[in-house]
Amino acid sequence: MSEIQNLIDKLIEFRDARDWQQFHDSKNLASAISIEASELNELYLWKNDIKEIESIDKERLAEELADILSFALLLVEKNKLDVTEIVLNKIKKNNEKYPVSKAKGTAKKYNEL
Amino acid sequence: MSEIQNLIDKLIEFRDARDWQQFHDSKNLASAISIEASELNELYLWKNDIKEIESIDKERLAEELADILSFALLLVEKNKLDVTEIVLNKIKKNNEKYPVSKAKGTAKKYNEL
Amino acid sequence: MSEIQNLIDKLIEFRDARDWQQFHDSKNLASAISIEASELNELYLWKNDIKEIESIDKERLAEELADILSFALLLVEKNKLDVTEIVLNKIKKNNEKYPVSKAKGTAKKYNEL
Amino acid sequence: MSEIQNLIDKLIEFRDARDWQQFHDSKNLASAISIEASELNELYLWKNDIKEIESIDKERLAEELADILSFALLLVEKNKLDVTEIVLNKIKKNNEKYPVSKAKGTAKKYNEL
């Protein structure tokens, strides 16, 4: 079995053992991703020194990233999407929005290139 | 090669072709995840009807989820973490924080159980 | 003195007593607003029943809103903006983006009207 | 009339002319604040140079801040709170959580002081 499907299965198993599917509509899952993303950002808040930024506690970082990924995978599953397909599609789209010739070395948004 | 590693490789390839590694410190990647998560939430804003919520445009949903997953994978890679490991670890931790006996059928936070 | 200026003065006083101005660049203040906004959203997470939504703990709501407003006021002050002016200007702009004739009774975004 | 009440009145007038009160439950207003906060953060994304950070377009900054403040004021009004009261209360609470003697010159969270 694919490793992504394996993770989704484990997340579903955890969810269903608690009867939580009733709470997991797409809107609440999207909100959960955003809330977890903010907890991730809190690890970096007020830090500007790159060494400090890149040496934050790896366990807390791992946990916040895991929370984000977990809710994202649950939303993927809920909407019958496929992680590999949607990420590769987005890369293809971004290849058009951000052609190397224009985007190289600049952090500008595509509509400002 | 694993499918997750394959996605990460593709994302790195896209990034490096544009010389964007210089912008991708962990703090900015975390901020990018949060910004993309809000774009996802915007799809659901002002909608309360469950049928409307579950029938939003699948292509836009796929794109926003792909953006979130992409920046999350780049942050995973940047910090030499492993997706499968951190997600399974978090499930294990949540098994302790949310024992089935207490958490079944309730959306309360662990500190309110 | 104006009540908004009074609040800003009190926030500055609190900040300066702790020598925190050094951390309060505009980027970190913006991140702080977003993090506090997520804490606010967490109060509503997994809740869909309108009665439950409108009866959450008022003290926690007040605290999260105060955090958001405080960092927003500090960012206003940092950038020498004026709350009344920017809010009234935005209302004027939104009056053009969302003319009553088109926007009445619909939650669509201006570019979908 | 107080300047804050004046802003709230103008926001209510704008809202009611469009019959938007029906969409403005507290959960959606909280989500709107978070979404606008991310648009604010997007202005700073990928920027680390303090001069660049402090010289972003003041008009866009003003608009994003106005959006955040507007939805925050609408949520304040919806829940019959008072801006001055909740901000001053939070400052008082933070005075206890972050005593000057411990918090001076450090960006640590209260539970790490």
Image: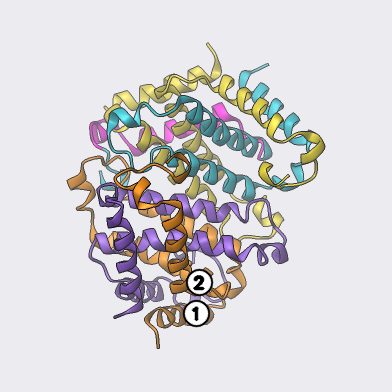
Chain colours: A orange, B purple, C yellow, D cyan
Would you say residue A42 is visible in this rendering?
no
Residue C80 position (above or below residue D17): above
- Report which residue position mark 2 lands on: A74
Residue A92 locus on image (x, y percent): 44, 63
Label 2 marks which chain's residue? A
Q: How far apart are marks 2 and 1 (CA)?
A: 8 Å
The residue positioned 71% from the left and 26% from the top of the image is: D9
**Residue D85 in magenta?**
yes
Residue A107 seen by the camera: yes
Numbered mark located on residue C22 in the image: none
**Marks 2 and 1 on same chain:** yes
Q: Mark 1 points at which residue?
A: A12
> Tag 1: residue type?
Ile
Which residue is at a point 35% across and 37% down the rendered structure image?
C28
Residue C3 shown in magenta: no
**Viewed as shown, does residue C8 lie left or right of D51?**
right
Q: What element carries label 1?
A: helix
Q: Locate residue B17, reporting x and y percent.
A: 29, 56
Name the foreground residue: A111 vs B77. Answer: A111
Q: Position of residue C47 (x, y in %)?
A: 62, 60
Start and end of the magenta stretch? D79-106
Decide: marks 2, 1 in contact (CB < 8 A)?
A: yes
Q: Which of marks 2 and 1 is in front?
A: 2
